[in-house]
Image (spheres, rainbow, N blue to C red):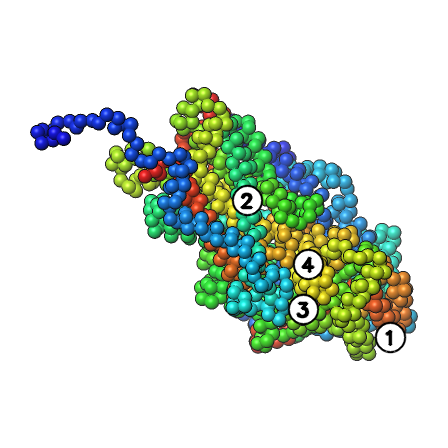
Amino acid sequence: MVAFVLRKVSFMVVTLFLLASLTFVLMNVIPGSPLQSEKATSEQVKKNLEAYYGLDKPMFERYINYMDNLIHGDLGVSMKKKYQTVERMISSSFGYSLRLGLASIVTSVIGGCVLGILAALYHRRFLDHFSMTLAVIGLAVPSLILGPLLQYIFAVKLGWFSVAGLKRPLDYILPTIALSASSIAVIARLIRSTMVEVLNGDFIKTAKAKGLAGHMIVWRHALRNSMLPVVTYLGFMIANVITGSVVVEQIFAIPGLGKFFVSSIVDRDYPLIMGTTIFYAVILLIGRFVADIAYVLVDPRIRLKGGKAGA
Amino acid sequence: MTRDDNPFAPLQREAGAGEKITRKSLTAWQDIRYRLKGNKLAMFGFWVIIVVVALAILVPWLSVHDHYSNDLVNKNKAPTWGHWFGTDDLGRDMLVRTMMGARISLFVGVMAAIIDFFIGIIYGAIMGYFGGKVDEIMNRLSEILYAIPYLLVVILLLVVMEPSLTTIIVAMSITGWINMAWIVRGQIISLKNQEYALASQVLGAGHMRIMFRHLIPNAMGPIIVTVTLSVPSAIFTEAFLSFLGLGVQSPVASWGTMISDSIGAMTIFPWRLFFPAFFLCLTMFAFNVFGDGLRDAFDPKLKK
Amino acid sequence: MKVDKKKGLLLPLVVVMMLAAVLSACSNNNNGNNAAPSSSASSSSSADVKKGGEFRFTLASEPPSLDPALMTDAQSSIVAAGLYEGLYRLDSAGEPQPAIATGYDVSDDGLVYTFKLRDDATWSNGDKVTANDFVYSWKRALAPETASEYAYMLFYIKGAEEYNAGTGSADDVAVKATDDTTLEVTLKSATPYFPSLVSHYTYLPVHEATVEANEAWAADASTIVSNGPFLLKEWAHEDKLVLEPNPNYFDKDKVNFSKVTISLVEDNNTVYNMFQSDDIDWIGAQAGQVPTDRTAQVIADGSAQVKAIASSYYYVFNTQKAPFNNVKIRKAFSMAIDRQSIIDNITQANQTPAYALVPPSIAGTDGKLFREMYPDTGYFSEDIDEAKKLLAEGMAEEGIAQLPKITLLYNTSEGHKAIAEAAADMWRKNLGVEVAVTNQEWGTFLETRDAGQFDVARAGWGADFNHAINFTYDLIHPKSGNNDGKYDNEQVGKWLDESLAATDEATRLDLIAKAEKQAIDDMAVLPFYYYTTVTMVKDDIEGVTSDYSGHIDWVFGSKK
């Protein structure tokens, strides 16, 4: 097992290296530069700035420099926010995104499971259609609409929550709902689709024949067997959710990490682009790795190291 | 019958009764169609899709309004007999614009589904089925593609391509299929060790046959859910791409751009948000129930 | 931060960050709980000084820097107005008023300015503000190593440009402190608006010892040493800034707010909702913006005020490329636009239709505004028939029977989109010309426009300082880097060069007006409108307004 994990980790490091290199090249070849501004400054000022940020050096040299610093754990200093280190910017804003993200994951999993199980148990009956309708609305109404709508109704009109910011624990509720609506829908739909199959599978029929009580069947067999796609989904969804959503952060004025993924690129803030990309990738890779291991827990028939089927 | 004599006497078996087919014989496709037709909700979904497509084709063609002419004096007007869906911030007819938007958004949604099917499923199935080094490499490759800032890729595309629908499809094909590939991979990893797959292998079936005849059909549930997930996300990705300058250019609008442009007007001129959002929800609902119906129809275990 | 060189993998870094985030979450909560009693304690302690109330507003993004030499944007300047005090401070009309300086003498040739400084101004750490602080600060902003983007604002000083270019030395920059309270500056050429320039944030002083000790001094509330009416108490990055009055400020009686909270909120609708639910006291003038769809309504019901500001909205023609290398075709396109209709129906904030470049709030001379002296209303008129005729003539001159494909380029924004669509519609209806409308994200847009890969492109210009030269030399001089349409008229360049050298203001303005008129006769650009700003303020706030350039002027406001 230790050897297995080590091998996986070394693969991850190679992946990160390739990703970082590719991103570095991409951000340098696209039009625009960190020094862009609507008002043209003098050539001289531009030269001073280029020298200051090392942008006058060839791309390859800057790449080597960046990688050298990266290996030593130095993510550099933002080119837009003067004298703010990328590490500080990420770590201070990640706290908000992480808390909101975790709240949203818990909500999604619980909400999704309940809706999905109800739908599967009452297949093609009212509860199925009802939870399906809810799920579709969750999918088709993005946080872009849901966020302002919730804000208008519950914060402005009813005054139950703050319009913006996360001042009180209660203030987490609206952004969490806006953030988790689509994940609830996906999880509910995934569970329903697999569970309907599983509930009709031979082993469930056997279990029923053996006289296992209804809820036992659901918990011990059906749910477990229909968790597999949900595990895959959570594996990559977690990275997306805990690194923040730019839309939800904007609507509720949350100082989270999500906006950096967009603003760093709009500003062409090279060190911040690299920092956020690598940070996101690390979480994504860990999430996917954990999902792979979780497969075995969910379905013991799966062998992780196995090559071809039956080989 | 000889029952009167002895109630416990065995029944006389008619010759050939065991061969008699009580149900009408159906081919696989007839069977699917038969079962789909029995599913009222799925049929409702099917007809909704037909109606929306018909509206998208006919309305802009039949209407006295067009989607681009400004009528600044009559801007932001609530629905009336002249403009059934009201007008937008430049006084353009919302009905025609919503239906023009349907053309783009439906096209984008369908293309997203096709990309999911052709790239996502195959890529995911190969990863999951072969495992080992193949899986490792393909998995890492998809993770790199997934983690590269999408905005960077899009801006690069902006440099080499003209803004158009084709460009949008290209932009979506780069990463749009990865969720699907990962979901399929997970399902295949689980399914490939099940008895029927092993049996099929023992019987000498080729990899392709096992993958496409046995494994993928059994993963259809999560596949259809993932498609119905990627369609709306593609519709909003299109809006995001248009926002960056990659997509269809104004005055043509899609549901995605109409929705994101009218968020601020939500409480003042609600019809500008409501109609595109309503049609998007309706279409999504239709796709979902129809997709579910399809899945059920494909699943022999649900036969009643 | 240094990590063990051999094992410096990212994985542990991420784990540490996650832990740190969770921990900081806990500590943040603690701070939040403690904040209430401690802040009330501090306000009660400062209550014996006459103080009243908190003022709350929003900024769309956090100031990239609070170091005067490195600032370039509205956000920074709005915060800096509270934190720092320069020689002069602009009042809301845009007129410079004495601040650290009590007055100045100027030599007969207009080259040497001698500023007299007050002797009771101190830094927040108690040190005295002296003339040497200004000498140090200005030279620092000019030093190539500082890499100040706005260093060119100081190029009026003799020797400044050379020092910044690395060809001259710091000693040759002609600014010196003859004693602690006397600052002598020699200019390259006579610049009558120099007192207005020294009010600009690039001219603000910094505390030498602080800057020398820590290059990142301005990135954190705890390390900033400033000399203004307010001090930065808290800077929660990407979240909010909290300012409190400076007890050592020399004119502290003028300061009324006991606390100023600046929240960082990007979304206009959220800002509006915050105002509605009484979370903030102000919207507008770069401190939040009333959502476009609401503008007409809040102006109509009297809950918002409209004020003209020194910014122009216009389109640039690519004058180096067919078909817009032809004057008549440019004129035709400009005359076919109904500006008032765009203002009434799209922008909806009572903007003034523009027929030239210099906005109405820019000062002229003798107490008159520039546009009062040289009204632009007769520069050209909107006339569809004339436009059609000019288009036909222009096409004949160029020998083209049909216009090539024309693209209108704008940077992505809802407001720009609506105007572009309306303009394209007017050209279609009035001239029968199909114009494709294309948007690009900011960085790409700037590069495309700089490279001249467009036919017509959106542009806007806001004042750096209160003088008409800022809207003419910068925008239409053949050598200016901001002449995006590459408009090239030697005569215009000559007049503008002469205006810089002119010794009296009337002649200077005459030359500027002549150049501007010529550029409009050539239709170098297509002017749309002069901006306004729509502001909303709570009833109990007084003395907060938008300044001439459209930035919130809040420093000496008060709460009833």
Looking at the picture, tell me which residue is in the foreground, C136 or B195. B195
Q: How far apart are the alpha carbons under marks 3 and 4?
A: 38 Å
Looking at the picture, tell me which residue is in the foreground, C243 or B189. B189
Q: Chain of mark 3?
A: C
The residue under label 2 is B112
Amino acid type of the residue tagged 2 in the rendering: Ala
The quarter holding residue C424 reads bottom right
Query: Are the two marked residues, 3 and 4, in contact with CB atoms closer than 8 angstroms?
Result: no
The residue under label 3 is C342
Answer with mark 3 or mark 4, whichever residue precedes in sequence: 4
Could you say whether the residue bearing mark 2 is in a helix, strand or loop? helix
Amino acid type of the residue tagged 4 in the rendering: Leu
Amino acid type of the residue tagged 1 in the rendering: Ala
Left or right, B298 with reference to C361: left
The numbered dot on residue C66 is 4
**In x, y percent, where is residue C501?**
90, 67
Q: How far apart are the alpha carbons under marks 4 and 1?
A: 38 Å
Could you say whether the residue bearing mark 1 is in a helix, strand or loop? helix
Question: Residue visible at 75% across and 58% down?
Answer: C456
Q: Residues within 10 Å of mark 3 (few under 14, many from 20)?
A: many
The residue under label 1 is C506
Looking at the picture, tell me which residue is in the foreground, C416 or B23. B23
Q: Nearer the viewer, mark 3 or mark 1?
A: 3
> Is C473 above or below relative to C251?
above
Q: Chain of mark 1?
A: C
